[in-house]
Amino acid sequence: MNDSLGFAHFLSNADGVATTILVLMVLASIGTWFLIVLKGIVAVRQRRASGAFLDRFWNASSLEDVARDMRSHGVTDPFSHLVHEGFSAVETLRSGNAGTRGLIATGSADEFLTRALKRSIERDRSRMEYGQTFLASVASSAPFIGLLGTVWGIYHALLAIGMSGQGTLDKVAGPVGEALIMTAIGLATAIPAALAFNFFARSTRNVMAELNSFAHDVFVMLSTGVKDSGSNDPKATGDRVLSLVERARGNH
């Protein structure tokens, strides 16, 4: 068998189509690993920041303490972002600025606050899903792109063997084996992308489930003022806060 056969020999004899396919898979692999590292680091930091914020939130004595804590620590995770958006919505209603914001301010105070929390959740969902479309595309297409490269390589290898008139097994196995490397590269590109997509998609679903549950608690606290006032009569304090909010909206 010719000792010169191998992947280097395949590359040196590859035409434009084979080279383009190989470059595409290399770029896809680089992009996949870049997203895996980037999203992995972001996910770890976000999980730690979320845990720390939730501990401080539930241990705070009032929403004013939560606001002071957020001013000192900043908005660094989806949960603190949700609370920040809730505070902003309440302040907008109380200051009467909602009346100048058009259709976004229509409806009751509760509806305005609900929409603000929903917008916050959707923005965080979009941020967490960054890059997942790319991972899904690579996972689904890379094996077929690699297979295309293999078919193209085998086609040209067989043409060369046919023109040489040497159709023995040792003359066929080398070129065909070279071409099959393209399929292996396609699988090596697709498998990490598929695993990463499933991992990050599951992580996003878990965070969204926790965030939606937390949003309900935030809505109740902001709309009733139970935690805010420390009163033993939630309805009375809730009526007081909602009255202030509605009165602020009614002035415009």
Image (tube, rainbow, N blue to C red):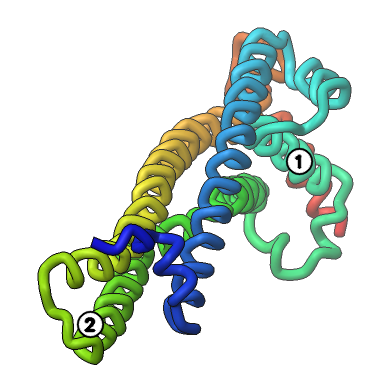
Looking at marks 1 and 2 on the same chain, the residue that comes earlier in the sequence is marked by 1
Q: Which residue is mark 1?
A: 90
Is residue 226 visible in the rendered structure shown here?
A: no
Q: Secondary structure at mark 1?
A: helix
Residue 78 position within the rendered picture, expressed as x and y whole percent measured from the top left: 63, 36
- For the point 41% across and 54% down, the residue is 189
State the quadrant of the C terminus: bottom right
Distance in Å between CA atoms under marks 1 and 2:
77 Å
State the quadrant of the N terminus: bottom left
Amino acid marked by disc 1: Val
Residue 57 position within the rendered picture, expressed as x and y whole percent measured from the top left: 67, 17
Q: Quadrant of residue 241?
A: top right
- Say above or below: 78 vs 141: above
Residue in the foreground of this view, choosing between 247 and 86: 86
Q: Give the left or right position of residue 22, taking residue 248 as reference.
A: left
Q: Residues within 10 Å of mark 2 (few under 14, many from 20)?
A: some
Residue in the foreground of this view, choosing between 115 and 41: 41
- For the point 66% across and 38% down, the residue is 82
Residue in the foreground of this view, choosing between 119 and 218: 119
Instruction: Tell me if label 1 and label 2 are in contact, CB under 8 Å.
Output: no
Q: Secondary structure at mark 2?
A: helix
Residue in the foreground of this view, choosing between 10 and 27: 10
Q: Which residue is mark 2?
A: 161
Amino acid marked by disc 2: Ile
**Foreground: disc 1 or disc 2:** 2
- For the point 71% across and 11% down, the residue is 60
